[in-house]
Image (spheres, helix red, strand yellow):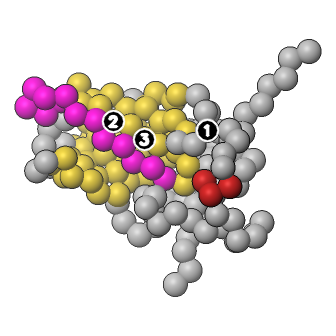
Amino acid sequence: MTLLTGCEKAPKAPEQDVKVASESALEIDPSLCDFHQNSCDKKLGETLISLEISPENTPSEKPLTVTLTSSERLEHLKVRVEGRDMFMGVIPLILSEAGKNTYQGTLIYGSCSSNYMVWRLIASFEIGGQSKTIMYDFLADNPAKNG
């Protein structure tokens, strides 16, 4: 008999568990990218790199438009998406140049029964011949914040 499980967290100490107020109200980590508000901006030295995902609620099992914009040209860009806290596989993401220092592609990822699935986008590239990596964490199926 084969048992397949997906989207299950490894056992953790109670203090490391995701904070859940109730089944209907989740406390969302404020350090995650929130595409409802604006792009998710990060700096590597003097280079500003921004991530946008549309639709902003980053729904599971639906096509998402991913846009990475940089203040400098990114050479040899390679992007992947994977679960931050649980293994959901590694999803390669092909981004094509859509404009000056703007790279765009389509992403689809699976759903998770936990109601709190954090994905991590990892971009590796070269700037001026130096290898760099940047990571963005975001919540799947992220409801708009009230207020």
Q: Quadrant of the N terminus?
A: top right
Please provide the residue range marked out in magenta.
126-138
Identify which amino acid the numbered label 3 is placed on: Leu
In the rendered image, residue 125, in percent from the top left (x then y), is placed at 24, 30
Please say whether residue 54 is visible from this viewpoint.
no
The residue at which mark 3 appears reads as 121
The residue at which mark 2 appears reads as 123
- Secondary element at tag 3: strand
* Front residue (pair 90, 45): 45
User: Of all residues shown, which one is farthest toward the left?
Assistant: 128
User: Of all residues shown, which one is farthest toward the right?
Assistant: 1
Closest to the camera, between mark 1 and mark 2, is 1
- Compare marks 1 and 3 and give the one earlier in the sequence: 1
Q: Are marks 3 and 2 in contact (CB under 8 Å)?
A: yes
Q: Are marks 1 and 3 in contact (CB under 8 Å)?
A: no
- Secondary element at tag 2: strand
